[in-house]
Amino acid sequence: MAASSTRGGKKLLEVSGLTMDFGGLRAVDNVGLDIHAGEIVALIGPNGAGKTTFFNCVTGIYTPTTGDVRIHTADGATRRINGMKPNRITGLGMARTFQNIRLFPAMTVLENVMIGRHCRTGTTILDAILGTSRSAREERESIDTSYQLLKKVGLADVADEYSRNLSYGAQRRLEIARALATEPFLLLLDEPAAGMNPQETHELDELITRIRDEENVAILLIEHDMKLVMNISDHICVMEYGKEIAQGTPKEIKENPKVIEAYLGEEAHA
Amino acid sequence: MSHLKRSLGIGLWFMFLTLPLMVVRVNTVSREVEWRWSNLVWVGICAFAIAWFWQFSIERRAAQRAKVAAEPHPEKDRPSLAQRLADDPVLSRRVLLAAALIALIFPWAVSTTQNFYHVNVMVSALIFVVLGLGLNITVGLAGLLDLGYIAFFAVGAYTYALLAKGFGLGFWMCLPLGGVMGMLFGVVLGFPILRLRGDYLAIVTLGFGSITKIVLENWDTVFGGAAGIAGIPRPDFFGLPLDGREKSIYTYYIVLALVAVTIFVTNRLKNSRVGRAWMALREDEIACVAMGVDMARTKLSAYALGAFWAGLAGVIFAAHNNFINPDSFTFMDSAMVLAMVVLGGMGSILGVIIASLALKLLPEYLRAFAEYRMLVFGAVMVLMMIFRPQGLINNMRRKYEYDTADVESNDGGK
């Protein structure tokens, strides 16, 4: 937390004192985290540390028991988004991917991305039935934007495939493209490199930095691949048993004895 | 070779099993035991043939699967007829035109002034096509299982019956009203079950269907109870007097027009922002919500629209039959409409139309085999689910046209 003073950029997301209880189990205990514009922030920790729960609280899938989740939108307003529905939060500009891939398998790759455009378009049922100019224009816009995003993640040549036919790595990239289609200012990636081979991980590494630079999107990611995390993150938050045990730059985290003991140390011995 | 052996075994087994039933008959008059050995031979041959065909089909299917699995790009498979139709606008337009022509000529071709039975049968079948297409929105596109769909049909039918008998409102006035009433009930049902899915949804909708029927049966001061409502006026044709045949043909054209409108609307919706949201909801609810789709609104719209078509169909049903009672709105009918959607292929318009016509017309024309028709019906369903679990016609993949030119040329696809 001490490191936050040295971080530049406008504050985008501000989480403070976030606690999430499931019955008697405290999955996330008083965790705070800030994300600034243009940053890649990593959330790491052993399995079961509460990282995904933290994600779900921030994106509205769960309502946190206590604590605040605030976002600072582009127009300078601050909004508390605890308990807001996930689709509203996505509408406000935070989009996510899932740890266990959640695509729409029976829809084509392009259609998957077009779903991301849903909250940025407003064609109503009547528009669609009557084929109004608005419906035609938005349809065109959705297709073009989605196709350009597919190009960006390298999936343009399989745009008409069913998404279930894609390889694992490609499905992960498709999830990222779909999330980007919602025009987020903050992208939340839940273990994007899980199940990828080293080559794919390396490509992902490039993709994430490229997205940050070109799309002007801040990124919060959960990841177990330490090489990837240390390579691309500006700021790291470490969790263990629901508690936050350290925050700082990759260098600080590497040297933090608590982290080494809890997490990296085990990895090193393994 | 092993096929032959197995089939032979199955044939023999069936001969043994059916021996007492098919071969031995005690003639109680002459007090003799008849041995009908020829029956045994037939059973053996039929069982053998069916078993052989069965194994052949199973193997072919397994081989196809293996082929698909082995191929790195399964999409390179030969496209289905339906897919080819969809991809070729000229061909599909011709087929559509031909179908429309046949549909228009049909009532005049098959009816005489005395006998217009076939037209009436077709009207009932087309009403179920509308129902099938309506439920296709809820179940096929949005993936919300509805086991009480026929209740909305009942709402439409009773709306017309009560308004026409009680207030003297005309058919054309009541048609939209019936649809709107169906829609209202759709929303009413939709609200409490927004959070449910799968089995729970099925149970609640099933309950809703039963409640509707029970209310209709028991509230006899309003709905006429089990006796129903009789003497419902037929649709009027600018006040001109029509004879029986003309009335039927007129109703036929009305329902045909409704089918056309339903197809048009479903097709437009399917390939729109709304339709994609429905499909995404069907595929993965959590991901769908996380991508910014308003679940409540999307689910409610799917329910309301599905119910809307059922309401419209109900009005026509009441007008066509002159008489309605709660027996037309049983769970069996809900299951029938659901079977049409599932057999036709979830989400596929053409498939649902074919399945609806087949499921309504086959039992009607199989009356000659009245005792066996439900048996045949059941067997067909089981076979369908084994060999084409995805339905008659696959929901087709939509291909979009896009500008492949690089906008930001330096970072195109790898």
Image: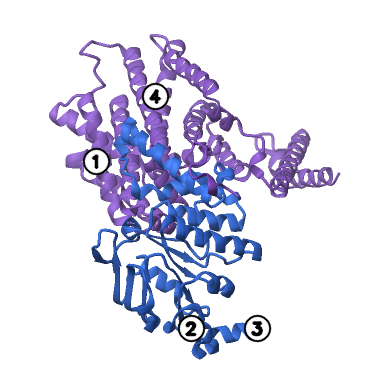
- State the SS at label 2: helix
Q: Colour of chain B?
A: purple
Residue A258 disc label? none
Q: Mark 2 Cα within 10 Å, few/some/many (few <14, many 20+)?
A: some
Q: Exactly how many numbered labels are in the figure? A: 4
In percent of width and height, residue B157 lies at 28, 34
Q: Nearer the viewer, mark 4 or mark 2?
A: 2
The residue wearing badge 1 is B225
Residue A252 disc label? 2
Chain shown in blue: A
Residue at (48% x, 35% y) in the render: B352
Q: Considering only order in the chain, which callout, 3 or 2, is on the residue closer to the N terminus? A: 2
Name the subunit of mark 3: A
- State the SS at label 3: loop
The residue wearing badge 3 is A270
The residue wearing badge 4 is B123
Question: Disc 4 to disc 2, how far (Cα)?
Answer: 77 Å
Question: Disc 3 to disc 1, how far (Cα)?
Answer: 76 Å
Direction from residue B409 to residue B329 in the image, left or right: left
Q: Considering only order in the chain, which callout, 4 or 1, is on the residue closer to the N terminus? A: 4
Name the subunit of mark 2: A
Direction from residue A84 to residue B372 in the image, left or right: right
Residue at (58% x, 37% y) in the render: B376
Image height check: is B43 above or below B208?
above
Name the subunit of mark 4: B
Considering every residue shown, the one lying at the far left of the view is: B167
Instruction: Classify residue B311 by image quadrant.
Output: top left
Question: Disc 3 to disc 4, how far (Cα)?
Answer: 73 Å
Does the CB distance between marks 2 and 3 fall below 8 Å?
Answer: no
In percent of width and height, residue B402 lies at 49, 36
The disc labelled 1 sits on which kind of residue? Answer: Gly
